[in-house]
Amino acid sequence: MSTGDIDAITLELLQETLVSVVREMRANLVATAYSSIIHEAHDFSCVLVDGEGQIVAQAEDNPSHIFPVPWSVREMLTHFDGDIHPGDVFLHNDPYTGGTHLNDIAMVFPVFVEDTLALFPVVRAHWGDVGGTTPGSISGKSTEIFHDGIRIPILKVASRGELVRGVLDLMFANMRVPRERRGDFMSTWGTCKVAERRIHEIVAKHGLATVQAATRRLLDRAEQRMRSRIAALPDGEYAYEHYLDPPASGTDPVKACATVEVHGDSLTVDLAGSSAQVFGPGNSGPANAATGVFIVLKTFLDPGQPINHGNFRPIDVRIPEGSFLNARYPASCAGSSEVRNAAISAVLGAMGQLAPETMAGDIKGTSNHTYIAGDDPRDEEPYLFYEYPAGGTGATAQGDGNSAVRNFAEGDFGSIQPAESVEHTCALLVESCEIRTDSCGAGRYRGGFGLRRDIRVLSETGLLSVASDKNVVPPFGVMGGGSGAPNEFLVIRDGREIAPSETPGKVAGFRLRRGDIVSLRSSGGGGWGDPLERDPDEVLADVRDGYLTPEAAERDYGVVMASGRVEAEATAAARNAHRRGRQELGVRYEDEPNGSAGLRRCRLPDSAMARLAVEPGDLVEILSPAGACLRAWTEGPATDGSGPGQADSVTLGRSAHRVLRADEGSRVRIRSIKNGPPAKTR
């Protein structure tokens, strides 16, 4: 049957039927999984692919799980060419060949119809532990892939319906809490069998030729729709650079660069210029950065239509090999989620230049992997708590960001696990769970607030591991909006706050004892627009709700309150004083001795350094007229009048113009980020 033989009603019916199969897979896995991270937090995703490994249907799952699926399927088709049969089951988690981090294990379940590999399910689920150095396998101090757990190249674990038990026994023997791991494996296998039955029912009703023709039509239609969206954009080149936290004490932040080039009805995203792979967990294989790019472009260009592989065809993603975005063996990839989010932030900044009115403040931009492990005194069995607290989302021109929820890049994940589930399965007590005060990025529209969750250890001892980003380089604001508060992870012991690591957000096996409180404090979203233009009554409402303190209201918004009301005259005076105190300088560009490699540097006159209260090596933001701010580290000493035009100027390398989009001599506003990391001196 040709694609032209399918009527519109049958085509739409088949599309929704395929999506309903994915939704049934989700429901089955939630109902049968052993791990709370699956049945409570929904850290898994389901998808249907065709015989060529192209995504055909998905639902509300996490796109970071789904977009790498074609890599895993291609590995199966390549390595088992001629040796794929009905009843075979394959597992894959290798980040260098399309996996994410080792905890995300993909099950590929080929389904044959009339001896044709036509359509089949894939499930990628997070297993709570896959071995490695620390309980939970992910930590902020991993430096090679062997620290991350057991690495599974594409591996056949069932042959013609029979499990290869020796392979599975070997695999589970290298994982903590093997009962949960076996249970999650079996529930995933059962979920794929449910999908297999539904696929056979669909083919029996419509015929294989019709189903194949429909999937081709759906993919072609998605491609055409995406091409039409791209063709409506102005041709040109748009660039942004984004920074991750330093991977270890005494190291520099890590740079992610994105250049988006629109040419006709196709689009290229080049990540050249990004930092090399790091000696730490913040690396990824090739699938993750590409996933981040696709998430942004699909959301930006075609958010209302179903996702399939046709959406990707007009997009070319170029990722330099050996960078932290496409690392080589044996780099640790435990923090691959942070790498994906870095790509998301970089592409968001670039796309915001193309259409500033659509720009949104940055999101928390990290998974905030948090593990607490110990032995439960109730049954003397080990427990493993895993959570990734949600944060605030960015503000837009239409309104404030949302507080302590998942964002557009995370799908149907839970913000946090219910306290009842945590306390039932672990020797832990959830002492408090609340909106984190003063954590939003200020703006005419503020970012969403983060989350604070305090968890008390009830076992005699425990171990804490954390892998997180944006603990020192916070989520950025746009159009003059402020940064959200950075993520923060502390241990409260005997009433005193303790940093569990010398590198914020990077913890491996910190020893806990009974009564310790692990305090999880997630970041807020970036703000949109000038905070001094925010309606004072809206600021007052946040203070009354306990989200903002009166001190933050005056410091960030210039809103003065007394007796629970806004003081209009005092507020007007405070806002005028804030405006007068802002630092504006002209822009100068100069040749860079090493091109655009390394951190973005800027030179400021001494008077500006003093006014901003910054020293050489401190982080500042230079507000762009085109969207997201440019971040740079100050160089010094710089003396007023040391060169022509420098007394009232900020001096940047020429490549900064691509990001800042401010012409030479134009005036820009500069502000400091007090919590930003100092750069190493050169």
Image (spheres, rainbow, N blue to C red):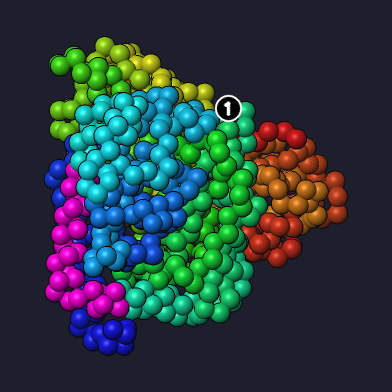
Using the rendered image of the protein, determine whether residue 101 is visible from the camera's viewpoint. yes
Using the rendered image of the protein, determine whether residue 484 is visible from the camera's viewpoint. no
Part of the protein shown in magenta: 187-213
Q: Nearer the viewer, residue 303 or 493?
A: 303
Q: Where is residue 525 in the image (x, y as percent from the top left)?
A: 41, 49
Q: Nearer the viewer, residue 531 or 265?
A: 265
Check residue 325 for magenta coloring: no
Determine which residue is flagged by label 1. 249
Q: In the rendered structure, which amino acid carries the disc numbered 1?
A: Ser
Check residue 199 for magenta coloring: yes
Q: Where is residue 184 in the image (x, y as percent from the top left)?
A: 23, 39
- Image-based side of 313 in relation to 259, left or right: left
Residue extending furthest toward the right: 643
* Residue at disc 1, secondary structure: loop
- Please state, as top left, top right, bottom left or bottom right, where the C terminus lies in the image: top right
- Image-based side of 339 in relation to 199, left or right: right
Residue at 48% x, 39% y: name it: 333
Relative to 486, residue 482 above or below: below
- Please state, as top left, top right, bottom left or bottom right, where the N terminus lies in the image: bottom left
Residue at 31% x, 69% y: name it: 306
Q: Where is residue 533 in the image (x, y as percent from the top left)?
A: 45, 59
- Image-based side of 216 in relation to 380, left or right: right
Q: In which quarter of the image is residue 591?
A: bottom right
Residue at 74% x, 46% y: name it: 603
Q: Nearer the viewer, residue 645 or 18?
A: 18
Principal secondary structure, stretch drawn in magenta: helix
Q: Quadrant of residue 624?
A: bottom right
Residue at 33% x, 47% y: name it: 90
Q: Nearer the viewer, residue 92 or 22?
A: 92
